[in-house]
Image (cartoon, rainbow, N blue to C red):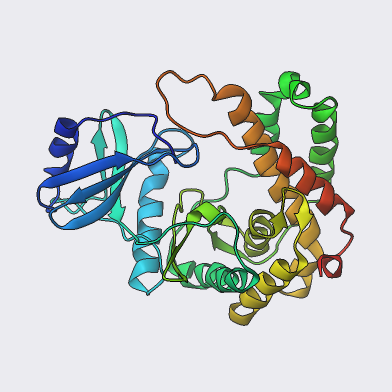
Amino acid sequence: MAVYTKINKEELEIFLSNYKLGELKAFTGIVEGIENTIYLITTEKGKYILTLYEKRVKKGDLPFFMNLLSSLSAQGFKCPSPIKDKQKKYINKIKDKNASLVSYIEGKSKKKLTPFECKDIGKMCAKIHLLAKKVRGNQNQLSINYWKNIFNKTKSECDLIKKGLANDISINLNFLEKNWPKNLPSGIIHADIFPDNILFNAGKVSGIIDFYFSCIDFFAYDVAICLNSLCFENQSTFNVTKAKNFIKGYNSIRELNKKEKEYLPILAQGAAMRFLVTRIYDYLKQTDLDGAIFRTKDPMEYLKRLEFHNSVKNYEDYF
């Protein structure tokens, strides 16, 4: 999330005239992440999140995201609920950008989760996998071929970040391509459960947000993403207690099978690679956008996490 596209009150009032939300009271940009433009909107009816889709989100994928949120929230899952306009549409335009409104969830994110909170998130991750079964989704477009393509765009500059980085990434990408699993249990995954996408209110998880990377992929890959995003301290120190609690929570709802456990280290390497190459791209290519307000994230922490996963030989080594 970020603020790439600036809007004024008049433009927003015209946009909101398509909805039955009452008069605009206030709005402010949210500077988190680097994918889309996000505003917190307050109207007579309450608070809402306005998203203007900027970068990797394709127009054709938007109905899937809206249907997923609608289905999950209707089943009681704690996530934003999409708002339909007067014509019963989820997607509109503002400043020539596709845009949507979703309900606002009270709460704030935390930089670090406790082991107990990791257990709760493990449960919620598994619930997404089970509750989203009836939603028609799209295959993951940010898989190995994407990692290779985006790496090639920055390959010549990687050594500006760290000497030998390009060679290290090339070796790891080749290994992943040769060893990536096939035919593991799959379905809709969140694919981006990071601390800044988890909201807490009154000491409890109030919701999971930012489903715009959701896709069809291996359920265990989502678990691997969470091991990377939730279970490290100080960039490179793996927190075994957090990992145990996350897996315990996940298995209490949907248990990983033998094959998923066998491939978890490789899936975790892949998850680390995904965030390494995309953060390198954002770090090198997205720092000079005219007028944009956003925060790039340090890519090197994921090199350290990748190196850790490379040292893990089997599922049991994590615990």
Q: Where residue 208 sits in the image (x, y, percent)?
A: 46, 61
Q: How many numbered discs sit on the rendered protein?
A: 0
Q: Look at the image and tell me in which quarter the C terminus lies.
A: bottom right
Drawn side of residue 102 relative to residue 196, left or right: left
Q: Where residue 256 sits in the image (x, y, percent)?
A: 70, 73
Drawn side of residue 144 relative to residue 20, left or right: right
| Above or below 26: residue 253 | below
Residue at (65%, 70%) from the top-left corner?
115
Residue at (72%, 37%) from the top-left corner?
300
Res 62 visible: yes
Drawn side of residue 227 relative to residue 36, left or right: right
Q: Nearer the viewer, residue 245 or 15?
A: 245
Drawn side of residue 190 relative to residue 173, left or right: left
Residue at (51%, 34%) from the top-left corner?
295
| Above or below 249: residue 166 | above
Res 144 visible: no
Q: Where residue 201 sits in the image (x, y, percent)?
A: 41, 67
User: Which picture quadrant has residue 142?
Assistant: top right
Q: From this viewpoint, which residue is outermost toward the bottom?
A: 252
User: Which picture quadrant has residue 120?
Assistant: bottom right
Q: Nearer the viewer, residue 313 or 25?
A: 25
User: Which picture quadrant has residue 296?
Assistant: top right
Q: Look at the image and tell me in which quarter the N terminus lies.
A: top left
Residue at (84%, 24%) from the top-left corner?
163
Q: Where residue 102 sits in the image (x, y, percent)?
A: 30, 54
